[in-house]
Image (cartoon, rainbow, N blue to C red):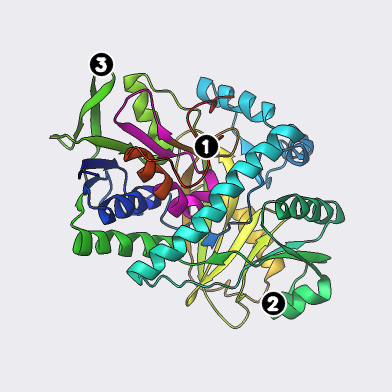
Amino acid sequence: MASMRVLVMGSGLLGVVTAYVLASRGHSVTVIERKSESAAETSFANGGQLSYSHAEPWANPHMLGKLPAWLFRADSPLIFRPRLDLDMIRWGIAFLRNCTAARAAENCANTLRLALYSREKMAVLMRETGIAFDYAEKGILHIFDHEESFRHARMQAAFQARFGCEETPLSRDEVLALEPALAATGRHLIGGMLATLDASGDARTFCIRLAEWCERKLGVTFHYRTAIDAVRRSGGRVDAVVAGGRTFTADAYVAALGSYTSLLKSIGLRLPIYPMKGYSITLPANDATPHISLTDGSYKIVFSRLGDRLRIAGTAEFAGHDARIMPKRIAPIIAAAKTLLPLAAWDAPREEWACLRPSTPRGTPTLGRTPYANLFLNTGHGTLGWTLAAGSAFAVADVIEGHAPEIDLSGLTLKGAAS
């Protein structure tokens, strides 16, 4: 098809990968970003996992049963900060509606379909660009110390196997044999699930190097320190985006704005996306650092070795757009991680980070068309932004070009997103 001028709003993982796909197809792509570089916010220091097998949404009956106890625990993996916030209240009500078995199964299947497609497209991207980002294709090991959670994980794995996603249950001895760093744990591990389709790596390094590759090889133009002032519309189309005191025009516009997709309220587009605040810490790696990426099923914390560093990330806090690092929320992550890996480099200086993950009540992203003919969405990925980035970008590019996407986008579009 004829080349188009495309403006991508946002230079995190979703924005940069979208720019890569469109530019590689011959389109003229411009990216605007309010920060001084790509991957400066949510994509900066995430858990480092490409967790294609982790498709179960937060909204599910198993989670619903835990909510009452978690609401009163200071170290809860999921916290709602009470506030007079109508958006959060609406989001919470929709979240509870999605906690039925039927809706959880549907949302899981939709996410898994996109995740497996994304795995295929990520392989294409890596092959075409040759970008190095501490990639490790060793799978992800989910560990458990409660039989109820372990049993639920096995049931979930059996459900996902119907869609081509295989996981392997492991005994405690098999877990320790696979990852000897867990031998010193103070936890009574009872077993694990090995997700062999999964991988890990440094998302920020990936994003920055892909942006550089797009500039150098594909002619993509990046405008940093360029915050959006206004989105202009006329009838059923977007006319321009005013950002950093400049006016940008294009044939098509892509909103990859994460938790700041709320900017589109100014043109009457209200999406059910709310920021889910997460935290991470980064330590130097040592001899006690795991070599395989881990997911702690009890504390909802993930561990990834990134070259000579260990990234530990977790928690889900609903506190509006407050991205400050709160010591009282970092502390539970450190405490749980120290129990699991007591010999890690805890005495060394560490980096702390907090970010706002753009989350939808149903747990699936929002992709593709909007009521405006030339405005498209690639947002709402929650904790799976990097995991789903490649597949989302290829699918959205197809929609922009007027092609049928290679996968069914049912349950992944604006239609029905608020339900």
| Amino acid beneath label 2 | Glu
Query: The C terminus lies in which quarter of the figure?
Result: top right
Q: Is residue 93 above or below residue 116?
A: above
Crowding at dot 3, Cα within 10 Å, few <14 / some 14-19 / many 20+, comes out as: few
Total tally of numbered discs in the picture: 3
Query: The N terminus lies in which quarter of the figure?
Result: top left
Mark nearest the camera among 1 and 2 is: 1
332 vs 122, nearest the viewer: 122
Which residue is disc 3 drawn over?
235
Q: Are marks 2 and 3 in contact (CB under 8 Å)?
A: no
Mark nearest the camera among 2 and 3 is: 3
Which span of residues is magenta-colored?
A: 368-393
Where in the figure is residue 95, as x and y percent of width and height? 63, 30
Quadrant assignment, res 154: bottom right
Q: Residue at x 55, y 66 (%)?
A: 199
Alpha-carbon distance for marks 3 and 1? Answer: 26 Å
Q: Please say whether residue 73 is one of the residues in the magenta stretch.
A: no
Q: Residue furthest top?
A: 235
Report helix, strand or loop for mark 2. Answer: loop
Which residue is disc 2 drawn over?
179
Where in the figure is residue 239, as x and y percent of width and height? 20, 26
Report helix, strand or loop for mark 1. Answer: loop
Which residue is disc 1 drawn over?
412
Question: Is 201 left, or right, of 158 in this rendering?
Answer: left
Q: Kindly tell me whether residue 85 is visible in this rendering.
A: no
Q: Are marks 1 and 2 in contact (CB under 8 Å)?
A: no
